Each structure stands twice: as C-alpha cells, then as structure tokens.
Image: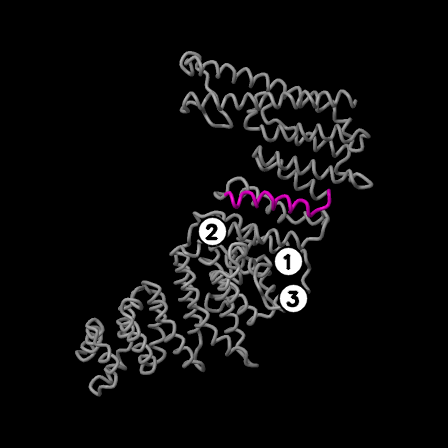
Amino acid sequence: MSDTVDLVDLVSKLLDSGKYKEVLSVHNEEKYARSFKDNCWDMISVAVSKIQDETIVIKPSLYSTCEELLAIIVQKATPEEALLEFIEQVEVAKNDAQFGIVLTPLQQLLKKLSAKRGRSLEWSLNSISTYMENIPTPEFPLEGKARLLAECDPNIRRIIRVYSLIPPFYQPFIEELKAPESNVRTKQIIAAFLISLLGKPLIYLDLDIENNEQSEARLCCTTIVKDICSLEKNILKFLEYVAICNKTNSKLKSSESDVEKPPYDHKDKLNMLTLSGLYYVVLSSQFDLPDNAIPQVYAREYIVHTGMLCVIYLLNCPEYGPQSKGLTLCNTLVKRLSTNASHTLLSAAVHFNLCKAMINVAIFASYDSLRKPAVNTIRNHINCFEYGGRCMLIKYIISTSNHSGMIGYAITLLKNAIDDAFKDTKMPACFTYPQMMDLIKKVCHMPHGAQSDLMELSDQIISVLNFLRYLVLRDKANVTGIKECYAYIESDYLSTLRNALNLSKAHYEVKLKDVKEGTDLVETKISINVGGNPLDSIPDAQKIEIINSALNCFHLMDGLVARLSECITVNI
C-alpha cells in the first residue's frame, strides 16, 4: 500500500515541480511497473486535476505531459476499470480543458473494447450529454447588426468550443457502423445522443442565416444533422416522436425498465426541446443538408402540422434563441401549405394553438426584433388559407387576444381579406349576411359598454370605425349584406360609443383643469387611469401631456364616428 501511495503522490509532485520527463518515464522503471498498472485509476484523476482552462496557453508542457500520461495509462491499465474512471472524469470535469483532455483517451479505450463494448459507449455519451447540458445558456442583449458580435461573447465562444470537441470523438464509431452487419442499437444510441446535442445549450444560440451564414454555431448544427442523416436515412421518422412527446401525459413503454428501453424512448435524449432543435435545422431551409436527407413520401399536411408542434414549443420558451427559431420555422412551414389552403385543415387544433403562441410573442416578447416578425408571421399564417379559414383564425384572435392593438390588427386583416374577396367573381359565404352580422357583432364589442376605457381600446375602436366605413363605401351593391347591419351598428355600437366618448371627454377635461389649477386629487378626489396606468405619481407636466394626447384621440374617434354615420345615412 505504501508503494501505491508513494507512486501516485510522486507523480503528482513531479507534475507540480515541472519534472515532466520523469513523469513520462515512471512507468518504465521496474520498481514502479506493477504499482503503475495497479493504480492507473488514481493517476487518471491526478493528471486531469492539474489541467485548467488556461493551462494549454500558460503551461503547454504540463498540458502535453498530462496528455501523454493519460495515453500511457490507456495502454497499461485494465480497459474496463480505466473506462469507468474516464467516464466519471467527464461527468465531474471542473472546466472545459479537463473535459477536452479526457475525450481522446476515452475514445481510445472504447475502440480497444470493440468486441466487449456493451453499454460502455452509451454510458460515455451520457456523461458527455450531462456535461453539455450543465453549460449555462447565453443571454441576448444585442439587436440588429450588433447581433453579428454575438459569437464574441465569452459564453457563446465557450459553447462553440466545447461543441467542436464532440464530432472527432463520436465520428469513428459512426464509421464502424457503415459495415454491412452493424449493430442497430448502437446506431440508435449515437443518433439519440446527436439529437440531444441540438437541445440545450445549442438551441439558445443565434443561428439566423441572415446574421452570419458561415457562423461556427451553424456549422456545428450542420455537422451534427449530417451525421444523424448518415445513421438514419429517414430523418422524418422522428416526427412520430414529436407527436408522442407533445402529449405530456403519455409515457413511452412505461412498463419497461430504464435499462431495457430502446434508445429513442429515453426522454432525456428525445424530447420536445431536442426534437424542435432537430426539425428547426431540417425543415427551416436555412441549412445545407444531404440531397436525400428528406424523404418525399410524407403527406405535406402531416409534416406541417407536426412541425408546428415544434414551433409552438419554441415560441412558448421565454428565451430569445428558441423564439427566434420558432418564427423562422413557422414561416417555412406556412410556405409549405398550398395557396388558399382549405379551412378544413383548421380542424387540427395546432393552428389555433400556434396563433395563440405567436400572439404572445408579438405582444410580450422582450425583443423588438421578435415582436415585429411575429406580427408578420401571424399575417402569413392567416393569408395562406382561403377566406373561410382566414375568417376562422381572425375571429379566434379577436376573441382570445385581449389586447387592443392585436384585435385592431386582426380587424385590419379582416378588412384586407374582404377587399381581396371583392375582386373575385363571387363573394364567399363567410363575408355575406347573416355571417356578416356575426362578424360585425364580434368586432364592435365594447366589454363595459359606455363605461369602457376608450384609451385602452383605442386601437381596436379606430380599426373598427375604419373597417365599417370602408365596407359601407365599398359595398354599395350590398353584396355582403352590410345594409342589414346598419341598424345594429347605429343603435348598439355607435350610440354606445358616442356616450362613452362624451363621458371620457368630460372626465379627462375635468382632470386637465384640476392638474392645471393644482387641485389634482386633493379637493376633487378625482383619479384617472390611462390605458390601465394611474396618473397619481406622474409629474404635472407629463400628466397634462398624457391627458391632451387622450383628448386628441377622443376627437379623432369623434370625427370617425361622424364620418361613418354620414356614410350610412347617404347609403341607406
């Protein structure tokens, strides 16, 4: 035992004192030969522990000595025992340099055990996955052209550097599988591992082709997916797993023990995050893939609808990277749908769930570079359907978005759809009476009648008034049945809106007077909200500016109401 302790301690001290030649000659000394072989396990951890991220730059001789020592251990040690220690070193690596220096000897041991490899390759890949997933995800404080600098960020550089270490490790094992009688389970183990690499942290990087087509992160993605394609000739087979993973309550062959599960049934490898990363690369048309990578026998609707499950998942992530990829993939999938796609496709709930996810990004995303594209994607999604489908999606947005600006945008899309329909030989049924009456009632809804907050609803109200005025002026022949809606518009909507405007103007004018006279909230005890925000703690000058802006908005609405009433009177 003393010889054992002495040898391990000796190697550690020799490394610390810079006596690298002596370290590499220890195994050749007869007095240490047996002890060296018996204690390779401990010497692996000693060699790895000496490595820090800056070692290769500050002490290149130490780094190369540790590399050579580990290579000697691979030759001298019992392969099965050394393998377990190297796998553990991957999992407990304290820095990327330790992680990287272990991969080559680990690979060499796996090659030596080709006939008795068993589950050791799977364990090795699992340890690598564990290390990768623990790398912190980057944040995106940059927008516009500044995003070109993203790869200079230390966190992103680290992710790319670590990913670059992975292909040289696994590719020799892919080459082995090209033999005629290769092991199917081994093929699936490697493919599942590669798919897992497309999740965290890679999916959080900016991979947009417009920013940098030849970025290192994009090249990593391309390499990984090409290797998946070399293992699985049908890359679309994993769409089945997307549908399964999307059902959160489903369990893949839950009766089987974890050991007996097929590789593709391990949810730590194939889940919505990793599969969404895979199909972002495969279906977004932003990456160069092998010509035969995508089979052409799948139904277009199946690819689109299952791909949209990935889009929804990505859009529901709070981070920039997944949301950006979701929008890119969504636009590509929408283009795959035929022009004027049938409204019957909307029997699949995925379209409405997609609409909801895009609305959330358009309204609440932290980045302007995501909000604007989300609005455009909503339009593209709606416009790919024929008029019945467009109408269904627009009504869904109006009913569920609870945001005046988004509802106003939906009403504008409705106006544009009707304008397009007027150019056809026959007006679609969804834009004629009595369906038109249902549309009018939906868009003219004021949630609290005359007591509604007009500033909060301003975008919606202005869009409604412009829409109705357009329809009255455009449809003098009453093709849509708009004239049958005049009585409802006048008595139920415009009358209520006039009362609301009178109340709001009076309320805001009193408030303006109080602020100017300095009696604000003290004598009159009048408080006011603008768009849901109280004015109590705002400086007087800013209060006056906000109130005047609101009054100007009310005057604009007043003018639109008057013009609409005039148009209705003239066209009765």
Q: Is residue 271 left or right of residue 449?
A: left
**Residue drawn at 20 percent across, 78 percent down:** 7
The residue under label 2 is: 147
The amino acid marked with disc number 2 is: Arg
The residue under label 3 is: 295
Callout 3: SS = loop
Let me know if residue 371 is in the magenta part: yes
The answer for how far apart the CA atoms under marks 3 and 2 are is 35 Å
Callout 2: SS = helix
Q: Label 2 neighbourhood size at 10 Å, few (<14), some (14-19), many (20+)?
A: some
Q: Earlier in the sequence, mark 1 or mark 2?
A: 2
**Residue 350, how many percent across, how many down?**
62, 49
The answer for how far apart the CA atoms under marks 3 and 1 are is 11 Å
Residue 303, disc: 1
The amino acid marked with disc number 1 is: Ile
Residue extent of the magenta highlight: 368-387
